[in-house]
Image (tube, rainbow, N blue to C red):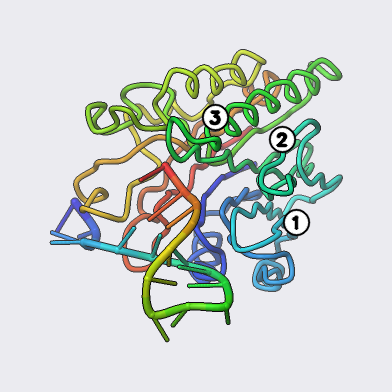
Amino acid sequence: MRIATWNVNSMRARIDRAVAWLERSDVDVVAFQETKCKDEQFPTARFEEIGYQVAHLGHSQWNGVAIVSRVGIDDVERGFPGMPSWGDPPAAEARALGATCGGVRVWSLYVPNGRTLDDPHLVYKLEWLKALRAAGQNWLTADPQAQIALVGDWNVAPQDDDVWDMAAFEGSTHVSGPERDAFNGVVDAGYADVVRPHTPGAFTYWDYQQLRFPKRQGMRIDFALASPALASRVKTAVIDREERKGKGASDHAPVIVDLT
DNA sequence: ATGCCAAGTTATACTTGA
């Protein structure tokens, strides 16, 4: 089985590329982030036409997460238990969608950005990751053999070599100690980064500005974390930087994990 | 090396993104 995660940065703007990518990538399950549309605007039929079932969660033009699968899509869950709210009045955002596909509990996650280190959005980001850690711990306590994939755009670069130049990120979000601690909290709860060992030094995101992609100046912020039972099934993983090339690309590349 | 910001809105400037 092959599982992927991809921050598509608007599904309506990218639907032709997304379909073409699916048709050449031979993936069974894809978790999308930043679909940037409401449920009724999501191009479900385009995926159904090529043999995939769809689950989508979107409330507005912001955020939005989806899972498409050709190996079943059951027990769809919108948001995880304890997920923090945001806004005035506070409401759950479209940042987490769970579904069981081919025996794997897949979570498509779009972690809050944080904006700046002194912004309330950063507090929200840290609380969101703390709550995800707690939920993840509970899932594994309930079933230590569960096959769980926590995949998506984590908006954290956990190591210095996950950005092209640490000096360029002085005082910025994504690389701060509290953000890294929050990310590693999920790892400590039992979820391993199963892509890094197969993709040393690789990035998953490159800013549209200043020729960051051709200059190879990117960030590793999209991750596939796996419970112990799932991690033991990982054969290999790749970051598909080909998909970042050309006109109309997302600023994130798909991340693909191959399972036995 | 594969190209010099992009997507959304009730818009023609602004927010968000990382």
Residue A235's label in the rendered image is 3
Image: A49 above or below A253:
below
**Which label number is shown at residue A55?**
1
Dot 2 falls on a residue whose secondary structure is loop
Q: Is residue A183 visible?
A: yes
Q: Are marks 1 and 3 on the same chain?
A: yes
Subunit of label 3: A
C-alpha span from label 3 to label 2: 34 Å
Seen in the picture, residue A249 relative to A228 is either above or below; the reply is below
Q: Is residue A120 above or below residue A214?
A: above
Circle 2 crowding by C-alpha within 10 Å: few under 14, some 14–19, many from 20: some
Q: Quadrant of the C terminus of chain A?
A: top right
Q: Earlier along the polypeptide chain: callout 3 or callout 2?
A: 2
- Residue A254 vs residue B18, the one in the foreground: B18
> Which amino acid, by three-letter code, is at mark 2?
Pro
The answer to the question of whether label 3 and label 2 lie on touching residues, with beta carbons closer than 8 A, is no
Instruction: Choose between A182 and A47: the one closer to the eye.
Output: A182
Residue found at x 35% / y 27%:
A200
In the drawing, what numbered circle is on residue A84?
2
Q: Nearer the viewer, mark 2 or mark 1?
A: 2
Subunit of label 2? A
- Which comes sooner in the sequence, label 1 or label 3? 1
